[in-house]
Amino acid sequence: MPRATRFTDSLESRIPAIARRIRNRMSSLGLNEQALADECNRLACAVVPGVEPLKMSRERVAKILMNCKKNPERTSAKIISYTELKALSAALSVSIEWLVGQQDNQDPVHWNVIAEPTRAVHLLHLLSEYEEKAGELLVWAEFLTCSLVTPELMHAQHQARFEELKLVGLEAEKETAVALFDRIGTTRRQRLLRSKVERGYSYRQIIFYSGLKVLADGESEYRLAGVDVRRESLKYLAGLVGDKALGIEIIIVDDEEARPLKPLLRDYDSLSVFGSELTLWGYHSGSVAWSEYGSYIELHRRILDELQARAMTNTPRGVIELLIDLSQQAR
């Protein structure tokens, strides 16, 4: 039996929620209690170096999972050690922050995805988990998200985004960052381009008209993409919007109408809300932050709702016409 620590003492009331997340993730991965215990023991030394080897057993996993019941048995786990939490999160390919829950935590979780490449897996899990849970993803971004552009444009965009690393002699770091974000984008595209019924959630992106004009003109993050690549990507997006089975919506916002709201977004390159479950936002540096705390979610949804109210057109046909017009202007 693991000894309690200050960390686990503070988690005692959260154990039922932790147990439910463990159980649900085990189901998603097809793991039984013995397989999870074996994987925890295998990974423990790597994720928590310098501690005595973990001896997780099937019985220990079962006692943790007893807390999923409304009235747990007396033999259910009363504490979970920090080493166990780290090993469980690694074995389940989730972040420890998600595993313990953040609903009552007023401090957002910050991840530097570039400096910590393993966070890419955590980020992808977080996105898929809450898309399915909320049934909705509403996102504003300065640029078209990777899911909505062609692979060629996505790669050129990432090359431009991390170009400064090469300028200071960090060529290897630049290529690592580009490959990492390409991988995230490819995974996200494959997920989104299933039918709305199959993927189980609605998808809507808000973008300023100026963000699309930058794409058409080949400026900023699109400066390394040739005109044909940019033109084809705008046509590609028009096709996605026109495919009713995909259920993808694009809200193009009038910059002048939204001018009072822009200061609220100046520090971010993206802002997303997953129903009433989660909010996630990205910084220009490539790091991300997220929170399950209700006040953050409500505030960010209000901002996104205000942006939507300033749309240039409210119909898919109007959006498609704007995109085709921009593709013809591409130079």
Image (cartoon, rainbow, N blue to C red):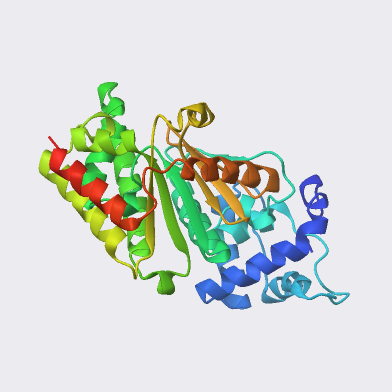
Q: Which quadrant holds residue 295?
A: top right
Q: What residue do we see at 19% from left, 52% from top?
A: 235
Give the side of residue 61 with respect to residue 271, left or right.
Answer: right
- In the displayed orientation, state which residue is furthest to the right: 74
Task: Evaluate whether residue 166 shows in this view.
Answer: yes
Quarter that holds the N terminus = bottom right
Quarter that holds the C terminus = top left
Q: What residue do we see at 59% from left, 43% from top?
A: 302
Q: What residue do we see at 72% from left, 72% from top?
A: 65
Q: Report the number of discs.
A: 0
Task: Evaluate whether residue 93 shows in this view.
Answer: no
Horizontal and vertical percent position of residue 308 = 47, 45
Answer above or below: position of 100 versus 157.
Answer: below
Give the side of residue 185 with respect to residue 227, left or right.
Answer: right
**Camera-nearest residue between 67 and 91:** 67
Answer above or below: position of 110 versus 3.
Answer: above
Give the side of residue 227 with respect to residue 115, left or right.
Answer: left
Horizontal and vertical percent position of residue 81 = 74, 55
**Camera-nearest residue between 36 and 210:** 210
Q: Which quadrant holds residue 329?
A: top left
Q: What residue do we see at 68% from left, 38% from top?
A: 107
**Camera-nearest residue between 171 and 214:** 214
**Camera-nearest residue between 31 and 47:** 31
Horizontal and vertical percent position of residue 92 = 55, 63
Answer above or below: position of 144 versus 213.
Answer: below
Horizontal and vertical percent position of residue 298 = 64, 46
Answer above or below: position of 187 versus 312.
Answer: below
